[in-house]
Image: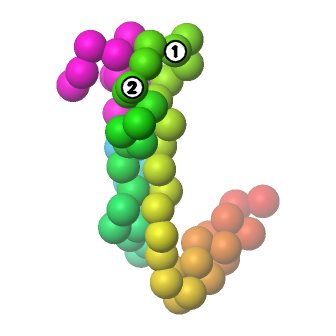
Amino acid sequence: MSDHPHDREATIALDRLREALAGHGIVLPSLDLHLLSYAGHYSSPPLIALGNCNAATAQRLADALAGSR
């Protein structure tokens, strides 16, 4: 972890998102904390970068989100 005041909050959110996606069989390989968010100290948590994915993964993600309504 870094010395960013919201590092723990962002890391927990990232881990929960990974687990939720995995529960639907979805893996976003580039899902991670957005490193440039650490360049300065802001009053909000660092951003989470969802990254790129192929069309099949995007469709699975859309299906999973549509099913949660």
Structural crowding at the residue carrying mark 1, measured as other residues with C-alpha within 10 Å and reported as few (<14), some (14–19) or many (≥20): few
| On screen, residue 64 above or below 9 | below
Magenta stretch?
1-13
Residue 64 x %, y %: 62, 70
Say what amino acid the circle numbered 2 marks: Ala
Residue 30 x %, y %: 36, 62
Residue 7 colored in magenta in the image = yes
Q: Which quadrant, please, contains the C terminus?
A: bottom right
Q: Which residue is mark 1?
A: 42
Residue 18 colored in magenta in the image = no
Q: Which residue is mark 2?
A: 39
Say what amino acid the circle numbered 1 marks: Tyr
| On screen, residue 33 above or below 39 | below
The reply, left or right, for residue 69 in relation to residue 27 is right
Q: Residue furthest bottom?
A: 56
| Image point (47%, 50%), residue name | 49
Mark 2 against mark 1, which lies toward the viewer?
Answer: 2
